[in-house]
């Protein structure tokens, strides 16, 4: 490495050089390299790199930074700098007069000099009360950093109505473990005791921090002993947000590990959040950078997996694109920053749950993840949940297509006692851009196969043949995937619906698509089901042109004993909710014999509909969300349908799907509504809608936020009692924030005790 390269390296590494040009640094370097040997000893190096950065760069541990070591580290730094975004383009700041700042508040016992050992700053929304508070722990490797570094970020969250507290804590080498975490616990306890006096809600305290602050935030949340000393439960922390935090102390370099935590392995274990994972910990949002160190990413993933293994049901992990370890915090001030949005949604969701719990009538809905997104496994963009008992155990299982990842997955219901944890699953096939997957026994062997519908460039439907032995269901290699020739590269296929269509023995498929040549039709299989696996003989019978079909439901709409087709079409000149009357028998193969009946909604962009008896009059009703800001209610009457509407809950513009059921066990059917809130929205994505004792069409609906603002684009939703406690839970999935496949636990009954937890 040349002297000029070394100068550039030091320009990047050492803050004392930042105000100077490169040639000035080179001049100063000559003074640093006092013996002129072209390498730096620890004593010659700037103070900013003498501690841990020097040890990291000194790979041969000879006590000097030689040219090859400096070049290696320089290359890494240059690459990181390329990945680091520039300054935020649209920083969020409170309006003038909307923020109060109080600095340098002593939070510990005063020392012999009469001064507080440590201090904190608070940033408060002016003229507000009952607001949530974010307790921020600064980073700096436990040897540097200061509470003032969070000022810009604090202003950003204050603008969103959230108070922020930033506290200093004593640093290495002045102190060693556990002083840092004890100081942080002291500061948090002070906030818990005093924040109400300043308008904050002590029941809505969140802990966050980056790097070393992320480590301390996780440790404070998971090791209850530190708050216990202050008479506080760890649940005084409403939620934790560790950002790129160190989760396993044993993986730190020797010099730093021994310097901060000592040489004892037992201490390293106790000081590691990873070894405190527990089922009953507060909700946690883990975040790290796309360009973080590989080890730091691995540690955060390990923390996530450890919590899930322990039975924790509310933990999420996020990777922030185009960020480095050091660029996450500065960019939180940006209007469109993904990290800030994740934090706001996390706080918003949990504050809604807290509010619901405090009113004495409603308790929060817990979200339990059936399967998380996994890019390597092809699980990105979960799109749909279809239910059936595929293994014959009497429990409803799930199949889901992961649209962006291409995996078609079946999830085996583990039963009520294990439903809150990850479900056993099998990837039955991999296809491109699957919009939907559905169970159907097409060869009549008693085993449920899976049919996937692909849009995008593939424009093909696939059959995933189930293994003959049910003991092989969870073996990926036992499933066989075939394209259906009659559909190959023909249309942008959206959905399939199994049904007995022409009265012959066996199941066929209603199918649908979207786009310029979109249509509705059905796939006619060989009469002899022994020949059903000859997919080349399957025939497509087109029934109708279509714009963009969202729902296919095989129902006997006219009471004649055969399967008619109810559907919603969101685009085109024939959009709306309609149904096709099946002529029955051999005539089903003649499209002209099918009669179309209009239900309504032609002036709306209709989405996924649901069918049920809303007013308990014995007639079939239809509910259909729209992208027009309202939910359509089609009341079944003697001669057709009477149309009503109600606004989307919370003003959400784009409804997605709805399920009908008696959620609160009051004898009246309710609605569970999911939406596409939009990328920049903080609106709730899942909502429970109940009505007062009068007719639902005229009732003033009561709405309850179920999800908070976590999640952007939800999909199909189904109401099923998954935990065996007698109330209806909600199964759905989300594809933009990649929340995966999950279910919301209805809090009406306590599944752990099997008794009522609410009063009527």
Image (cartoon, grey):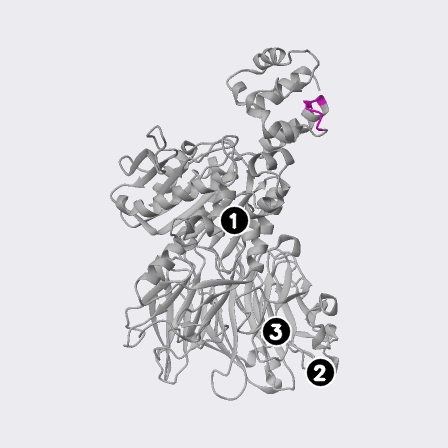
In the rendered image, is residue 748 in sight?
Answer: yes
Front disc: 1 or 2: 1
Q: Is residue 530 left or right of residue 702?
A: right
Q: Quadrant of the N terminus?
A: top right
State the mark number for residue 177.
Answer: none
Q: Nearer the viewer, residue 54 or 505?
A: 54
Q: Quadrant of the C terminus?
A: bottom left
- Quarter of the view holding residue 671: bottom left
Q: Work out whether 211 lies above or below 21.
A: below
Q: Which residue is mark 2?
A: 529
Q: Is residue 108 left or right of residue 60?
A: left
State the mark number for residue 439.
Answer: 3
Mark 1 and mark 2 residues within 8 Å of each other at the beta carbon: no
Front disc: 3 or 1: 1
Q: Position of residue 720 (x, y in %)?
A: 48, 74
Q: Which residue is mark 1?
A: 286
At x 35%, y 84%, the residue is: 617
Asked if residue 338 is among those painted magenta in the image, a careful observer would answer no
Q: Secondary structure at mark 2?
A: helix
Q: Work out whether 663 lies above or below 374.
A: below
Q: Position of residue 674 (x, y in %)?
A: 44, 63
Q: Residues within 10 Å of mark 3 (few under 14, many from 20)?
A: many
Q: Nearer the viewer, residue 380 or 310?
A: 310
Whichever of labels 3 and 2 marks the residue nearer the N terminus, that label is: 3
At x 61%, y 73%, the residue is: 439
């Amino acid at each position: 490495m040349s002297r000029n390269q070394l100068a550039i390296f030091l320009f990047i590494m050492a803050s004392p050089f930042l105000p100077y040009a490169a040639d000035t640094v080179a001049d100063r370097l000559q003074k640093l390299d006092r013996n002129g040997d072209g390498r730096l000893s620890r004593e010659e190096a700037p103070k900013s790199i003498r501690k841990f950065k020097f040890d990291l760069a000194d790979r041969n541990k000879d006590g000097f930074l030689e040219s090859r070591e400096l070049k290696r580290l320089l290359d890494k730094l240059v690459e990181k700098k390329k990945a680091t975004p520039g300054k935020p383009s649209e920083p969020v700041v409170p309006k003038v007069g909307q923020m109060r700042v109080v600095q340098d508040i002593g939070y510990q016992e005063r020392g012999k000099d009469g001064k507080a050992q440590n201090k904190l700053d608070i940033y408060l929304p002016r003229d507000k009360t009952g607001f949530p508070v974010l307790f921020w722990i600064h980073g700096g490797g436990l040897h540097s950093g200061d509470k003032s570094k969070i000022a810009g970020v604090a202003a950003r969250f204050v603008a969103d109505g959230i108070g922020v507290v930033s506290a200093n804590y004593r640093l290495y080498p002045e102190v060693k473990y556990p002083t840092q975490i004890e100081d942080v616990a002291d500061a948090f306890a002070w906030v818990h005791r005093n924040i109400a006096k300043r308008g904050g809600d002590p029941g809505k305290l969140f802990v966050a921090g980056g790097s070393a602050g992320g480590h301390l935030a996780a440790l404070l949340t998971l090791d209850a002993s530190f708050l216990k000393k202050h008479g506080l439960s760890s649940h005084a922390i409403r939620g934790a947000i560790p950002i790129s935090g160190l989760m396993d102390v044993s993986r730190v370099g020797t010099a730093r590990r021994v310097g901060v935590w000592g040489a004892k392995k037992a201490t390293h274990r106790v000081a590691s959040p990873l070894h405190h994972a527990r089922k009953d910990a507060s909700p946690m949002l883990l975040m790290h950078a796309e360009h973080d160190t590989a080890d730091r990413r691995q540690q955060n993933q390990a923390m996530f997996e450890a919590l899930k293994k322990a039975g924790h049901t509310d933990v999420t992990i996020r990777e922030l694109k185009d960020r480095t370890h050091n660029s996450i915090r500065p960019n939180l001030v940006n209007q469109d920053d993904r990290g800030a949005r994740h934090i706001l949604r996390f706080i918003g969701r949990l504050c809604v749950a807290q509010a619901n719990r405090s009113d004495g009538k409603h308790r929060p809905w817990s979200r339990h993840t059936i399967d998380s997104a996994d890019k390597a496994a092809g699980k990105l963009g979960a799109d749909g949940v279809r239910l059936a008992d595929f293994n014959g155990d009497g429990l409803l299982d799930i199949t889901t297509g992961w649209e962006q990842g291409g995996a078609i997955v079946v999830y085996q219901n583990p039963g009520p006692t294990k439903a809150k944890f990850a479900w056993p699953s099998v990837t039955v096939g991999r296809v491109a851009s699957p919009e939907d997957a559905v169970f159907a026994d097409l060869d009549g062997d008693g085993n449920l196969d899976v049919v996937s519908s692909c849009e995008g460039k593939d424009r093909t439907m696939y059959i995933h043949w189930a293994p003959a032995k049910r003991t092989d269901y969870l073996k990926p290699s036992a499933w066989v995937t075939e394209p259906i020739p009659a559909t190959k590269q023909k249309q942008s296929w959206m959905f399939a619906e199994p049904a007995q269509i022409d009265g012959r023995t066996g199941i066929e498929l209603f199918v649908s698509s979207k786009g310029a040549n979109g249509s509705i039709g059905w796939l006619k299989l060989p009469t002899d089901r022994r020949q059903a696996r000859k997919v080349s003989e399957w025939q497509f019978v087109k029934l109708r042109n279509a714009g963009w079909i969202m729902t296919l439901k095989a129902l006997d709409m006219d009471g004649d004993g055969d399967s008619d087709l109810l559907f919603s079409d969101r685009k085109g000149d024939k959009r709306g909710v309609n149904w096709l009357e099946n002529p029955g028998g051999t005539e089903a193969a003649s499209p002209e014999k099918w009669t179309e009946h209009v239900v309504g909604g032609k002036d709306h962009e209709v989405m996924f509909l649901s069918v049920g008896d809303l007013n308990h009059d014995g007639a079939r009703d239809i509910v259909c969300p729209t992208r027009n800001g309202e939910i359509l209610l089609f009341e079944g009457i003697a001669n057709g349908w009477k149309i009503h509407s109600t606004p989307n809950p919370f003003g959400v513009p784009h409804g997605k799907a709805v399920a009908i059921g008696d959620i609160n066990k009051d004898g009246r059917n309710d609605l569970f509504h999911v939406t596409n809130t939009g990328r920049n929205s903080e609106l709730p994505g899942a909502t429970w809608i109940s009505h007062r004792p009068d007719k639902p069409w005229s009732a003033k609906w009561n709405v309850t936020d179920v999800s908070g603002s976590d999640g952007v684009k939800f999909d199909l939703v189904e109401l099923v009692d998954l935990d065996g406690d007698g109330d209806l839970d909600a199964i759905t999935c989300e594809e933009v924030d990649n929340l995966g496949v999950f279910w919301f636990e209805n809090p009406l009954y306590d599944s752990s005790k099997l008794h009522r937890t609410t009063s009527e």
